[in-house]
Amino acid sequence: MIKYFSISIIALAIISIVGCNNNTKIKPSEDHYFSINPAYEDTIDNLIASMDLETKVGFLHGTGKFVSGGNKELAIPEFWYADGPNGVREELERDTWKTLNLTSDSVTFFPTGTALAATWNIDMAFKYGKAIGKESRARGKDMLLGPAVNIIRTPVCGRTFEYFTEDPFLNSRIAVGYVKGLQSMDVAACVKHFAANNQETERGRVSVTMSERALREIYLPVYKATVAEADALGMMGAYNKFRGDYLCQNDYLNNQILKDEFGFKGIVVSDWGATHNTVTAALGGLDVEMGSREDYYDSCYFGTPLVEAVKNGKVPESIVDDKVRRILRVSYNLNMMDKSKQKKGELTTPAIKKDVYTIASESVVLLKNDNKLLPINTDAIKNLAIIGAIAKQPQSFGGHTAGVKAKWEVSPFEGLSNNLKGKVVISYSEGYNFEYDGNYPINKPDNKLIAKAVKEAENADFAIVFVGNTRNIETEGVDRKDIMLPFGQDELIAAVTQANPNTIVVVVAGSACDLNVAKKQAPAILYSWFNGSEAGNALADILVGKVNPSGKMPFTLPVQLEDIAAHSFGAKAYPGEDLVVNYTEGILVGYRWFDTKNIEPLFPFGYGLSYTKFEYMTASTDKNNYTKNETIHLQIQVKNVGNITGKEIVQCYMQATNSKVKRAQKELKGFAKVAINAGATQNIEIPIKASDFAYYNESESNWEIEPGNYKLLVGSSSRNIYKEVNITIIE
Ligand code: BGC
């Protein structure tokens, strides 16, 4: 199936196009794409046949905090893991969580998950995976514990910043790119956290229940895609339970779906300390137990108790063989047996620096730009007030296991100072204090700091107010209590925008924040994420117009938290009652909920402006009627009617107009990120498989493509639809 479309250039030359549908393959280039090589299977079987039970079990559990297996006599190297997902974690003592305090393990801090997803660019995802793969290789890691792909069901989930999006289609495209890039460097991905792990509150104890349809349509597609399209070598079982059973010993999800149905050939690794039983886990699809205490490596669930369980007939030895086969398959396919064949790694090189800069600069989302306040005309201004302590706050470390010991990190303040040196005088004031109650920010304005900031703003031609979260607030292990901007930042925005009409609000966060005040008061707003080592440089280039913003929101920004589906059904839907969380909203997650229920978002899914303007001229398909196996070739003409080059993310949503079942009002089925020169019109083709219109029929336990009428809705966000094309699916 085509993924790189034919492009006809009507006016000027076009730079790049990165559209995709469900069968997208990464652009052919000099890169070697990883795929599992069946030629190793006989060798592996012979090797297993030569092992006694104890030797085999020796491969199935941690022998350190981030290492498992290995066998000197058989010349099989130990298997080394590292967190993930947005930078290779620092070296810890083998048996403890204590840092080794090395000077040689600093790495690149990659933009976190939502930033990558905001690029809507699978080439960026591949670049990201490959670059982090180079650093993992250089650090001697065999498996990187990423990408983290859980659906963003609620913005308060503490790990939202690690994840990508609320939409299963965008999720799959970004994850596939990441895994392909990573594994092209002979480093295994560990796609996490499988599955239905969408909150941190009581994550070790809650049981998630949801309809089979929601599971299939919303939560599982990303795992299926990374297996089918990228040969993902690892999956991490999540901490929580699903329908009453722990995920690391969940026969239904691990065996029946992941391994049997999706054909997963790699290893299911437990989350650290997420194994609860020997026999149930062994039979429930777990392959490697990680995270046991240092004095329990041999006696953990998958240590001597597993040997015993096989000996007394509770676990067939063939099950152990299958687990060993999987880990050896991963090891052979990573060329671990002959390291001279492995790709060479590199750490914090200029090439990687360029990659993270490029990704960061494609991720920033322009949410508002009244009277073309941005970009800042630096020739016309003399002084700039930078306000808000987040402008100087490092964001690499923190967030728990996703914390990165960054070799360098350019803050927004630094980026702007370097960029404007000698041209514009910069003043800085904090605007607020970072005050916490545990992980929760204290949301109290500091009137003295606000008064100082107002003064600075009054004396400046331009003010930029930096607001958002720190990595204390958005972190593993804790959900946020709400989505309010912390530390009295709303009061700061209100005061500064009053003092200076040329005020830009920059949001630094990994998840949704309440931007009501900012939207009402500020003429310009940018979402700048936790954007990696080059965050400040990328942002500065966007602010001064060296780079035209091209990111779009990978999740909905709500008017209020209560508008989010998971927060619309009381405690039973979030955070759960009696340790059960019922996903009552079913398939209506993210914009599917807002659109179906007619709830106005503050900024919709897929939204983002540019310094130029695009007009959607035409949209058409090659035919009107398609059979279920056919591909719809959607042709769209987009014109850049402004006077600078820009990139647009053209989105196509499907609407089932006469379905016999309830469908979401619209579902994303394709997108293309295209660069279009000023004045140019471009033809874009987005191929969409008719089979992607299927819904999951619970009574038949199967996907069903209903014949009937559908609309293809084409636009620049889920709520900015400019063209509609009617098509019919026929029997
Ligand atoms: C996290 C995982 C992480 C693991 C190892 C767990 O707490 O949930 O995402 O990879 O720790 O650090």
Image: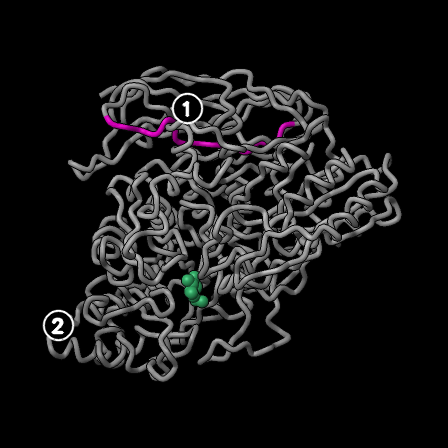
- State which mark lies toward you, 2 or 1: 2
Tell me the element at label 2: loop
Query: From the viewer's perspective, is residue 589 above or below residue 509?
Result: above
Quarter occupied by the N terminus: top left
| Residue sitting nearer the eye, 369 or 577 | 577
Point out residue 233 in the picture as x, y percentages from the top left corner. 37, 58
Point out residue 630 in the picture as x, y percentages from the top left corner. 32, 26
Mark 1 neighbour class, 10 Å CA radius: few under 14, some 14 to 19, many 20 or more: some
Point out residue 388 in the picture as x, y percentages from the top left corner. 70, 50
| Residue sitting nearer the eye, 3 or 402 | 402
Q: CA distance from mark 2 to mark 1?
A: 54 Å
Quarter occupied by the C terminus: top left
Return the mark for residue 239: none
Q: What's the residue type where badge 1 is placed?
A: His
Mark 2 and mark 1 lie on one chain; the one further toward the N terminus is 2
Return the mark for residue 314: 2
Total labels drawn: 2
Q: Which residue is mark 1?
A: 633
Q: Residue furthest front?
A: 447
Q: Which residues are magenta?
A: 661-676
Mark 2 neighbour class, 10 Å CA radius: few under 14, some 14 to 19, many 20 or more: some
Answer yes or no: is residue 412 visible: no
Position of 558 with respect to 465 (left or right) is left
Figure quarter occupied by ligand 1: bottom left
Query: From the viewer's perspective, is residue 233 above or below residue 275?
Result: above
Answer yes or no: is residue 614 visible: yes
Q: What's the residue type where badge 2 is placed?
A: Lys
Residue 671 shown in magenta: yes
